[in-house]
């Protein structure tokens, strides 16, 4: 599992993208929103588990590994700085919401998807 994009804040996806892949002679299209993901902010990796939109091979496992890493960092910082649990939880949730679509984009690339040539994308996402 490649986790090089876990802390790649400067390489964040900031605009909507359409990803395509040819599967069994049919074109499969996935959309990456490229914005702050509020549902990931509130529900973390569990949002991807219960959402059909983010079904792609390896993505949910990657999210739980990232969540485990962030929780361990959170626990360590909470132990070092007493009384700051709420602050670290909020920072972790914000980071998860910011990076969720970037992690999805990188997983789609790893699974063989390519960016569509036509960049005219509607802002209406499922």
Image: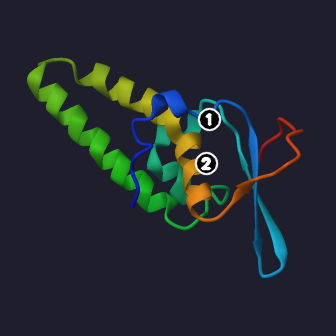
59 vs 4: above or below = below
Q: Is residue 106 above or below residue 56?
A: above
Picture quadrant where residue 92 is located:
top left
Outermost residue, bottom direction? 24
- Name the mark on residue 105: 2
Q: Quadrant of the N terminus?
A: bottom left
Q: Tell me the tag on residue 50.
A: none
Who is closer to the viewer here, 28 or 75? 28
Residue 108, how many percent across, how many down? 61, 57
Q: Residue at x 43, y 52 (%)?
A: 63
* Residue 41, percent from left and from top: 50, 34
Q: Nearer the viewer, residue 104 or 89?
A: 104
> Callout 1 environment at 10 Å: few (<14), some (14 to 19), or many (20+)?
many
Label 1 to label 2, Cα distance in Å? 8 Å
Which residue position is annotated with label 1? 13
Mark 1–mark 2 CB contact (< 8 Å): yes
Task: Locate residue 109, reporting x and y percent.
Answer: 61, 56
Left or right relative to 109: residue 70: left
The image quarter containing residue 84 is top left
In what element is the residue under mark 1? loop
Q: In the structure shown, which secondary structural element does the residue marked by tag 2 occupy?
A: helix
Q: Nearer the viewer, residue 99 or 91?
A: 99
Decide if residue 115 is on the left or right side of residue 13. right
Mark 2 crowdedness (10 Å alpha carbons): few <14, some 14-19, many ≥20 = many
* Colouring rule applied to residues: rainbow
């Amino acid at each position: 599992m490649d986790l090089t994009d876990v802390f790649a804040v400067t390489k964040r996806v900031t605009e909507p993208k359409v990803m395509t892949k040819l599967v069994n002679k049919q074109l499969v299209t996935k959309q990456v929103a490229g914005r702050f993901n509020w549902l990931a902010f509130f529900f973390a990796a569990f949002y991807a588990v219960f959402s059909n939109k983010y079904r792609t091979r390896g993505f949910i496992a990657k999210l739980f590994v990232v969540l485990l890493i962030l929780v361990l960092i959170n626990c360590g910082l909470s132990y070092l700085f007493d009384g700051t649990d709420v602050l670290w939880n909020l920072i972790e949730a914000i980071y998860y919401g910011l990076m969720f679509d970037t992690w999805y984009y990188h997983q789609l690339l790893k699974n063989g998807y390519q960016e569509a040539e036509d960049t005219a994308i509607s802002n209406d996402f499922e």
